[in-house]
Amino acid sequence: MLAGLAAAALAEPRPANPYDVLVRALQFPERIESLTAYLADVLGALSGQGGEATDPSGGQPRSAVLQRPATLRSAAVPWLASPAIADYREALRKDFVRTVGKPDGYMSAGQLAGLAAQGRLPGRVGAEAWLAAHDRDGDGRLTIEEFLPSAEEIARTVDLVALTNSFVHGIPYPTGQVPLRSGAAFGLATTGVRLFATPAEIEGRIRGYASRIGGTTYRDANGRLAVRDANGQPVFPLPPDIVPPTKEQAEEALRRFVQQIGGTAEFAPDRGPLVRGPDGREIPLEQWPPYTQPPYHPPQ
């Protein structure tokens, strides 16, 4: 969807200043939660159209960074892909320093071959291919800046879904590096998830449920949509997959859950719960008890 929006923007006559396209990107407030990834798509598409983006701070072209549009392996850009890519680059930087011994040193072809043999290069490419693509001055060795892939290169060669999942849950990246700043520490696994379902969404589920059981809907004394079965008898309570629990009900169930497993849970009013197992690792949403995951019933 994001790539489609970028393509639609580029279908119009190209403005004199390519950054005008970025200004248009800001005209989609309903996509604000994915704005970073959307801007990355637009920048990549601009570079593919031959645009030469200018750095506003120095006025220098940045076409070297935006040489080709990113062709992503994943079907969609994950919500937290941008911080995951940034953290992954820092993990690769740490690989360089550990291998070379200092950040201002040089990585030899042999040292690079050692990393490639361990599968620690993005895209799991060979050492020769990496050296050929990154050795800008042709001296047969790499500085740390030559060694590090750009964010665009990572997006083009790495499975962003797997990369982002590693970042969010604090598990090793596909190439073995450990996230330096696990997204789990900030509750990022549920930050991008809607906290509350909409009333219209819930009423739609209720009507669908009534239709499936051959019943009817009506408004109760409090004005809430309710269901009668085929015999005219009220159906109460409705199944939890039809009417989700409130945030407070889910949090209480999660408190009981973590007490049973020896884990911990953190709650905040502006995001979903953060649930950890006995080992301190975040437990992903799909492993929570039934009907405790957001989106929850909206506050009444």
Image: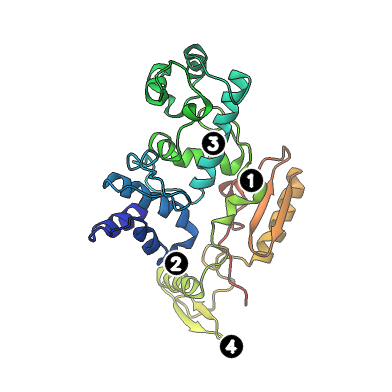
Which residue is drawn at the image coordinates 58% and 69% (left, top)?
297
Q: Position of residue 42 (x, y in %)?
A: 36, 52
Q: Residue furthest top?
A: 110
The residue at which mark 1 appears reads as 184
In this rendering, position of residue 39 left or right of residue 111: left
Q: Earlier in the sequence, mark 4 or mark 2?
A: 2
| Secondary element type, mark 3 | helix
Picture quadrant of residue 271: bottom right
Q: Earlier in the sequence, mark 1 or mark 4?
A: 1
Q: Are marks 4 and 2 in contact (CB under 8 Å)?
A: no
Q: Amino acid at mark 1?
A: Ala
The residue at which mark 3 appears reads as 88
| Secondary element type, mark 1 | helix
Q: Which mark is residue 164?
A: none
Nearer to the camera, 103 or 127: 103
Which residue is drawn at the image coordinates 41% and 68% (left, top)?
212
Q: Which mark lies nearer to you, 4 or 3?
A: 3
In this rendering, position of residue 7 left or right of residue 135: left
Q: CA distance from mark 3 to mark 2?
A: 28 Å
The residue at which mark 2 appears reads as 30
- From what the image shows, is residue 5 above or below residue 167? below
Q: Which mark lies nearer to you, 1 or 3?
A: 3
Q: Earlier in the sequence, mark 3 or mark 2?
A: 2
* Mark 1 nearby-residue class (10 Å; few <14, some 14–19, many ≥20): many
Quarter the C terminus occupies: bottom right
Total numbered circles: 4
Q: Are marks 4 and 3 in contact (CB under 8 Å)?
A: no
The residue at which mark 4 appears reads as 221
Q: Are marks 3 and 2 in contact (CB under 8 Å)?
A: no
Q: Position of residue 152 (x, y in %)?
A: 41, 40
